[in-house]
Amino acid sequence: MHHDHHNHHHDGMSPSGHPYRPDSDTSLSYWQTMEIAIRELLIAKGVTTPSEIAAQIDAMDSRSPANGAAVVARAWTDPDFAERLAQDAGAAATEMGFDIGPMKLIAVMNTPQVHNVVVCTLCSCYPRNLLGLPPDWYKSRAYRSRTVREPRKVLAEFGVTLPDDMQVRVHDSTADMRYIVIPDRPAGTENLSEADLAALVTRDSMIGTGLPRTPAA
Amino acid sequence: MAEWASGMTVRVKTYAPPGHVRTPTYLRGKTGTIERVLGPFPNPEALAYGVPAPALPLLRVHFPMSEVWGADTENPDDTLEAEIYAHWLEKADD
């Protein structure tokens, strides 16, 4: 059958061929109602303002893996900083100007012999102040249950196949601490600047499900 | 001597209490070594219900994968670390 892209709209599809997202015309849940009520009360009583709330949402949305990548690149180029990061990651990140809020942070260091990977089997604990919002798969039951049971198989599915003599350390983020993996610095990066190094650091390499990029050949 | 110290051998209790708990089932009854002592932090199992939450030591416990999963672990030299609140741990004599 002739497929006419321009004039014929399939049922439920937009002109560009994507399904329309249904309007959420259902009534508010209990907690949605509670959130609106509390927000309106805080504004009415002068505790906060709509623009402060919008600014805070903007600040939270602007957090991205670039923050964590800057920390990793600093650790690669400054051995004293790397040492402070290993001792007290929260203080070291704050020293770089990152507001980590109430988050308590542990940096786990990859070496040629050790690969670290982070999971939260109980929920989805994630170092948002340094990495932004977690990817959906981080919160999936499959990732949460399999990473502690068969980490090597999970890592292989992410394209990270590790030799048998390399130790895998899985960190289950079960309580108050948050974790960032400091990947091992790739070979062939001796002459790169800190900013160029940061561009090699992927989000997944700081969760442990990936490795940093290697410099373009 | 401190009640908890890194290097100490501990066993996770085998409670199965109802409600909000933060000790994964797969680690209950398993023996590990304290990797570092953290906290004290308010007990999240009380915080979750808005009742007074006394601060407790939080221990990062290091387990060999072979202890957690037995003979059919992927690689017995791999390790698992998790944060366990003090009231879930008992000292194990090795």
Image (tube, coloured by chain):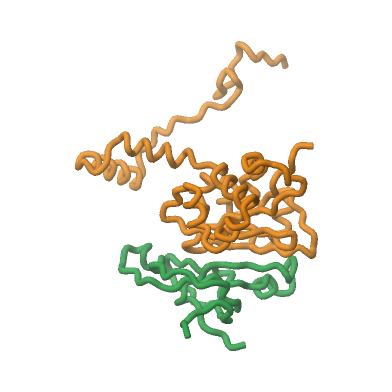
Chain colours: A orange, B green
Left or right: where does residue A121 sit relative to residue A36? right
Q: Nearer the viewer, residue A107 or A95?
A: A95
A111 vs A98: above or below: below
Location of residue A25 in the rendering, given as x and y in whole percent from the top left corner: 39, 33
The part of the image, by quadrant, that contains residue A155 is: bottom right
- The residue at 61%/55% (across/down) is A181
Location of residue A56 in the rendering, given as x and y in whole percent from the top left corner: 38, 40
Seen as rendered, the residue at the extreme bottom is: B93
Left or right: where does residue A187 sit relative to residue B49? right
Would you say residue A121 is visible in this rendering? no
- The residue at 66%/75% (across/down) is B67
Would you say residue B21 is visible in this rendering? yes
B87 vs A34: above or below: below
Q: Nearer the viewer, residue B59 or B67?
A: B59
Left or right: where does residue B75 sit relative to residue A71? right
Location of residue A77 in the rendering, given as x and y in whole percent from the top left corner: 64, 50
The part of the image, by quadrant, that contains residue B26 is: bottom right
The part of the image, by quadrant, that contains residue B27 is: bottom right
- The residue at 43%/65% (across/down) is B20
Seen as rendered, the residue at the extreme top is: A7
Seen as rendered, the residue at the extreme left is: A45
Left or right: where does residue A6 sit relative to residue B59? right
A192 vs A171: above or below: above
